[in-house]
Structures are given as C-alpha cells and as structure tokens.
Amino acid sequence: MPFREINSKMIEATIAPGQRLFSQRGAMLAYKGEVSFTPNTQGGQGGIMSMIGRRVAGEATPLMTVEGSGTVLFGHGGHHVQVIELAGDTLYVEADRLLAFDGTLQQGTMFMGSQGGVMGMVRGQVTGQGLFTTTLAGHGSVAVMAHGGVIEVPIAPQRPVHVDPQAYVAHHGDVRNKLSTALGWRDMVGRGSGEAFQLELSGSGAVYVQASEDKL
C-alpha cells in the first residue's frame, strides 16, 4: 500500500477492502470514503508478545487500525514525513517516530543490547531512546517522522557511518551499531550537548538521519 506524499509533512494512503494499515493515534487529518479507525490492542502484526515487549520497554505508542474503502491524509505535530519502501528487509525504528505503515508488515521489537552488548544498553540511556526498538519486516511502506527532513545515508562494508545519536531516525539492512566516544568534537564546534558520543553503524544497509537534534 504505497503512500503518496502530499508535501513534506503530509501523506495520503488509499485504503481498499481487505487491506489495512496501522497509524499512530491522532495522526489522521482527513479522510474520504467508508473508512474505520479502531484502537489497536494486539501490537500490530507482531501479536501480543510484541505489544508486551513495547510496554516493558516503555514504547507502547498507541496505534490505530485503519480499514475500509477510501483515502486518508496523515500527518502529526507538523513533523516532516519520510516514506520508506521495504522489499523483504527489516526496518529498525524508534516507536514514537512511526506515523503509519502497511498492515502486511510484521511488527516486533528488538533489544538494542543484542546489537552492541553493553554499548547498546548505554545508547538507550544516553540518547533517551528505549533499550528496545521497533522492527518492521516484509514488503510494504512505512512513513516515519522527523525534525527538519530526513536523508538516507548508505552503509557499506568497511565504510561505517558515524551519526549523532540525537539525529538517528531509523536504519535497515545487515547493520550493527555501537557507541563510540566523540573525543569532544561536539564541544569543539560549539554544538556540545554534554554527550560526547557517536553512534557507529557498520555492515551493509542504510541509516536515516534527521536534520535536527530535537526529539519528537
């Protein structure tokens, strides 16, 4: 179910009978046709264990199930929206950044410590993001939110990408992450936040970076 970008902060989804999508509650701006919006209590396609995992992690972002026949406009908080197309791979994204996504995608959670040991856990503490992150896998579309727009940065073998943890939005592919000290570079350029860390991503895939250090 591809999303059509209306502008940098709004998307339109076409809903057909037998299809469904999930959206963040409060993200519906307008709709046409016979469309229903139902609070989702089953954790999306990931089932009840996925929902429990997010609640344990404090990432139980409320979702709505959207079904019927018509078109729906989505946007939230004036944030910029980026549409990401998945072709059988997995997207790792912070739960509160999800605006809407295809109901065909399998939703789950992953403990970030498993992708970097102790440093993965430190990342959660330093960045204010959860120790768990949401995963969406399969074929379909995902709309994520960010401040100031998003750029996709490729990650290639032997060419890791270093990202300000506050600017990280999501990533996909066979990617590992860890925190590394930034050696005070943030303070040297006058943008110091008291967190001299970089998020290092290595492997093969891509990372999505927002043009801001503000949280949603």
Image (cartoon, rainbow, N blue to C red):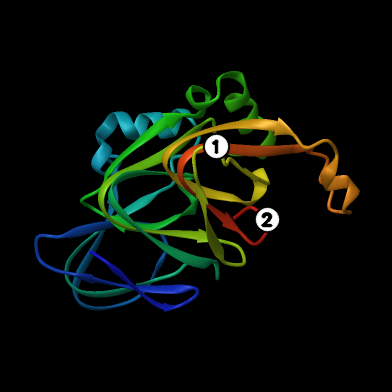
Q: Quick check: marks 1 and 2 in contact, CB under 8 Å?
A: no
Q: Earlier in the sequence, mark 1 or mark 2?
A: 1
Residue displayed at 43% across by 33% down: 55
Q: Which mark is residue 158?
A: 1
Give x and y (percent) for residue 182.
Answer: 78, 37
Residue displayed at 88% across by 46% down: 187
Give x and y (percent) for residue 107.
Answer: 31, 41
Vertical comparison of 99 with 75: above or below? above
Quadrant into which the N terminus falls = bottom left
Secondary structure type for disc 1 = loop
Give x and y (percent) for residue 13.
Answer: 28, 71
Q: Which mark is residue 214?
A: 2
The type of residue carrying mark 1 is Gln
Task: Count residues near mark 1 (Cα–Cα under 10 Å), then give few for <14, some for 14-19, many for 20+.
Answer: few
Quarter occupied by residue 68: bottom left
Question: For this view, does 89 lie left or right of residue 54?
Answer: left
